[in-house]
Image (spheres, rainbow, N blue to C red):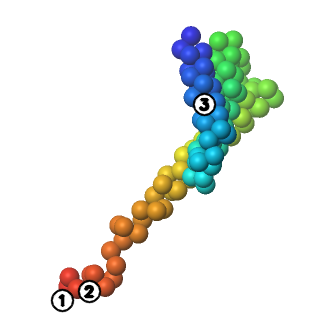
Amino acid sequence: MLNIVLIFLILIGNVLIVCSYKTNHALRTGSNAIILNLAISDTVVGVVSIPAWCYINLSGWQSSGWAYSLFKFFDILSASSSTLHLTSTTIDRYWPYRDRFITPASHLDYITK
């Protein structure tokens, strides 16, 4: 039951992100394109991985065969895609502020004198 609620929340949240990106032209920036791709990646997790995982656990399916290998492939692919999108979002958010944390060499020379 909890998995069905989780799938529903994943779909609703990510569809809202995609719709807001599509309708509001001010949101069409490079940073928000990464967020859009993350939403699409998470939608794949909600549509493919979680229902397949629920089916495997409820049916007592054995971990052999081509269908289970296909599930594992999509599960790892979608989880890796989400992780890489989160990493790229973090780097994209850090990039504009990185120069503020680097102390210029001329300032260090002044302090040591």
Q: CA distance from mark 3 to mark 2?
A: 52 Å
Relative depth, front residue between 34 and 7: 34
If the image is split into quadrants, where does the N terminus sit? top right
Say few, some or many: other residues with alpha carbon within 10 Å of mark 2 (under 14 / 14 to 19 / 20 or more): few
> Where does label 3 land, which residue?
16
Q: Estimate the x, y position of residue 36 in percent, counting from the top left.
A: 63, 42
Q: CA distance from mark 1 to mark 2?
A: 6 Å
Relative depth, front residue between 24 and 52: 24
Q: Against 64, is 17 above or below?
A: below
Asked if residue 72 can be seen in this view, the reply is no
Say few, some or many: other residues with alpha carbon within 10 Å of mark 3 (under 14 / 14 to 19 / 20 or more): few
Q: What label does residue 35 carry, if any? A: none
Name the outermost residue toward the bottom: 113
**Helix or strand or loop: what does disc 3 sit on?**
helix
x 36%, y 71%: residue: 102
Q: Estimate the x, y position of residue 37 in percent, counting from the top left.
A: 65, 44
Name the outermost residue toward the left: 113
Relative depth, front residue between 103 and 36: 36
Label whose residue precedes the other's in the sequence (3 or 2)? 3
x 68%, y 16%: residue: 55
x 61%, y 21%: residue: 7
Asked if residue 56 can be seen in this view, the reply is yes
Say few, some or many: other residues with alpha carbon within 10 Å of mark 1 (under 14 / 14 to 19 / 20 or more): few
Relative depth, front residue between 26 and 18: 26
Label whose residue precedes the other's in the sequence (1 or 3)? 3
> Where does label 2 land, which residue?
109
> Where does label 1 land, which residue?
113
**Helix or strand or loop: what does disc 1 sit on?**
loop
